[in-house]
Image (spheres, rainbow, N blue to C red):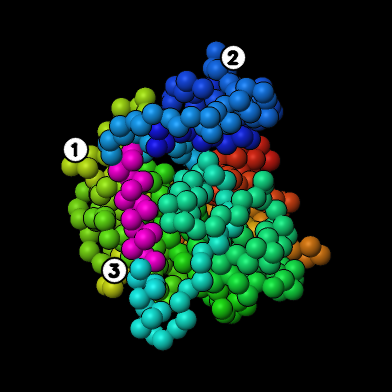
Amino acid sequence: MSIGAVVSPANPASTAEEYTHMVALSRPVVALAAPEVAAKLPRNLRCVVIGSNEYKSLSSAGGVAPSPPVAVKQSDTAAVLYSSGTTGRVKAAAVSHRNLIAVISAHRNNRVIAEKEAAEAGEEPLPPTVTLFPLPLFHVFGFMMLLRSVAMGETAVLMDRFDFIAALRAIERYRVTLLPAAPPVLVAMIKSEEARRCDLSSLLFIGIGGAPLGREVAERFAAIFPNIELIQGYGLTETSGSVASTVGPDECKAYGSVGKLASHLEAKIVDPSTGEVLGPGQRGELWVRGPVVMKGYVGDDEATAATVDSEGWLKTGDLCYFNEDGLLYIVDRLKELIKYKGYQVPPAELEHILNSHPDIMDAAVIPYPDEDAGQLPMAFIVRKPGSNLTEQQVMDFVAKQVAPYKKVRRVAFVSAIPKSPAGKILRRELVEQAVSMGTSKL
């Protein structure tokens, strides 16, 4: 990026059709790809295969002679990042150098605050940061965390692919201090005997993002691993991965919250029906504005105009609220709310409850089409090995903790919940699976 090149990392697990769509959006001039990925790329795109003689020649060329300086403006596009595509086809967000500078500045500011609070409390200075990356680097969370490590002179430990046991051993071996991860990693640590046997004493912080983290999971984790501080954060591809995060031990104990708004951002909660700006404690769509907001979607002016208004406000599509102390709470994606008999049911709320059950390894809730109710909350459950948990027991467990309209009304047991590389539940796949199963009303 420092030489003026625009990078556009993509998921190596994508299909040939998905690559064709991404290439049509970003229009790259060259691709660097592993052999198995190169075979799926459009033939008219120049491709340098990793490990080939051409690749080795390119990678060694930098040491022969320094590249001539290139003038790069803050407004120039630095990266084209693809949205997760959990609610539709992926879109390509153009992120500028200014966006990246703002993100790194926020990270630096948070570290200064943490160091100041530690000094005031008479605590020892924090050790040098060693970050383990179980995250995919093509996702905005992993991409931005890697840039942070490089920009702030930290040590980064990269994994070829995520493996939970390998991650635990890497924490031991490299004395990892920071682990950015999605909530499923936290759930796995809670339920893993191996995690209790490993020496995780170096691990000071786990940064949670990519998907909502429930209060119940956070509290259970804190009880088992009291010396690891949970940093809860929230961001989007369209905001360069930076909107809010908890800073300091007090905020980090506000379980269920994603912290306070980043210092470089403005925000408001808007009623999605009326456009009225709402006050503390009132739920509505979160709008944000500031230097981290993307330039726009590449090749999709219509989607850009629908997402960012003429005054620079980005509509996140997330149902949220601020409390009186300015802490931000994420309820759910507006598009994912289940419409049951006119009521709106947040699937994330039900998932947090389900994941607190000792016999449930993982859970997802979807809207199942129903002629009478419109949509029914349906739960997909991964049982703990050896468990005989029944459908009725699942429904009864939830019913005791929610209003009647939020009750789970269908249950299916599966071996795994389909998720994106960042840990987001692929609800569309589950809806298709449920409909094809022809599950009867329970």
User: On the picture, is 124 further left or further right than 296?
Assistant: right
Considering only order in the chain, which callout, 3 or 2, is on the residue closer to the N terminus?
Answer: 2
Considering only order in the chain, which callout, 2 or 1, is on the residue closer to the N terminus?
Answer: 2
Badge 2 local density, few (<14 within 10 Å), some, or many (20+)?
A: few
Q: Please say whether residue 260 is visible from this viewpoint.
A: yes
* Residue at 61% across, 44% down: 430
Please provide percent x and percent y for residue 429. Answer: 60, 40
* Residue at 45% across, 83% down: 123
Mark 2 sits on what residue? 43
Q: Main secondary structure of the magenta part?
A: helix
Query: Extreme front residue here?
Result: 65
**How many angstroms separate mark 2 from mark 3 (CA)?**
51 Å
Looking at numbered disc 1 in the image, what kind of residue is underneath it? Ser
Q: Nearer the viewer, mark 1 or mark 2?
A: 2
Kindly state the secondary structure of the residue where label 3 is placed: loop
Mark 1 sits on what residue? 310
Q: Nearer the viewer, residue 11 or 436?
A: 11
Please provide percent x and percent y for residue 20. Answer: 54, 22
Mark 3 sits on what residue? 326
